[in-house]
Structures are given as C-alpha cells and as structure tokens.
Image (tube, grey):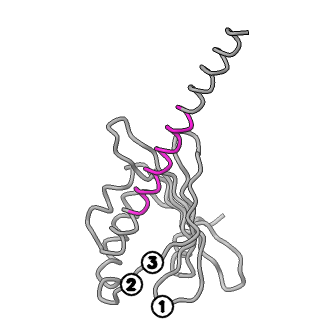
Amino acid sequence: MKKILSLIMLFGVFLATGIQAFADDSAAAKAFFESYVNAANTYSPTIEKMYSPNAKIIRQVVKPDGTLVDVTTDTATYIKQMKLGQAGAKLRNYKNTYTDITVAKAGDGYKVSSLRQPSGENYKLKTYMIVKKQPDGKWLITEEMMQTKQQIFLKYANKK
C-alpha cells in the first residue's frame, strides 16, 4: 500500500511540475504577445525581430459580402510592407486594441488568439499568432493571421 501511495504522490509531483511549466510558458507567450502589441503601437523597429525569418503570414481579407480570402506572404515581404505602412500610420496615430486574448498550446508553441479593433473603427477582427520559444530562450512569431477589411490586399491573392 505504501508503494502505491508513493507512486501516486510521485506521479502527482510530476504532474504538478508539468502543469507549472505549461503555465510559465503560457504566461511567457502572453507576455511576448503584449510586448508585440506595444512594439506595433509605438512603431518600434524591434517588431521585425519578433518574427521568424520563415514565418507564415496570412492576411484574411473580409470582403464586403462577408466572404473571406486568405492572402499569404513571406516574412521578408511582410516586413517591407509593414515598414512602408508605418510612416502613414504613425502620422495618423493609428493603433490596434486587442481584446478576448487567449493562449493555448499548439504543437511545440502557443497560439495566441484575440480580437483586434483598429483605431477609429467600431468593429473587431479575428487574429492569431503562433509563437515558439527558441533554444536561446527568445520567443518568435512563426505564424500570424490577421483579418482585415482593406481590400487592397486582394491584389496579392493567388489566382486559381
């Protein structure tokens, strides 16, 4: 009986340790997301270092009829487009507000989902990013999806 109780206690300790590690990394993933939001809303040049060089970037265009079109690009192209757009955004003091933030384990990373409200708008759009902790301890965005109502992105959509 003592052996069984000892095994149950040992299992409980391992389980508690695993749950704590998950909670710590989950909290770190959320903190990374919050630092991303701050960097984006202050037009910090550090934001481009938050992306993996081979991140999957998806802009999901919400068409006026409500249909969705995914437009994907690579990290380098996205960073170039972001830098071009930052100057005008900074002049307009454009910012995004994120609500309903959730963090869930996704493979070897974490999926941070939220609703994004562009400044000056009364609607919210879905967004998520997959963030992964690197061997050196740094967090990087490996996938990002943001919905947008900006129809200009449709010109980059793959024609099938």
Residue under numbered circle 2: 94
Please tell me whether residue 54 is drawn above or below residue 127 in the rendered image: above
Q: Amino acid at mark 2?
A: Tyr
| Distance CA(mark 3)–CA(mark 1) | 9 Å
Task: Tell me if residue 21 is in the magenta stretch.
Answer: yes
The label on residue 120 is 1
The label on residue 96 is 3
Q: Are marks 1 and 2 in contact (CB under 8 Å)?
A: yes
Nearer-N-terminus badge (3/1):
3
**What secondary structure is found at the residue carrying circle 3?**
strand
Please tell me whether residue 150 is drawn above or below residue 105 in the rendered image: below
Q: Are marks 2 and 3 in contact (CB under 8 Å)?
A: yes
In this view, the residue in front, 54 or 15, is 15
Give the magenta-colored segment's residue range: 17-34
Q: To which quarter of the image does residue 35 belong? A: bottom left
Q: Position of residue 85 (x, y in %)?
A: 35, 78
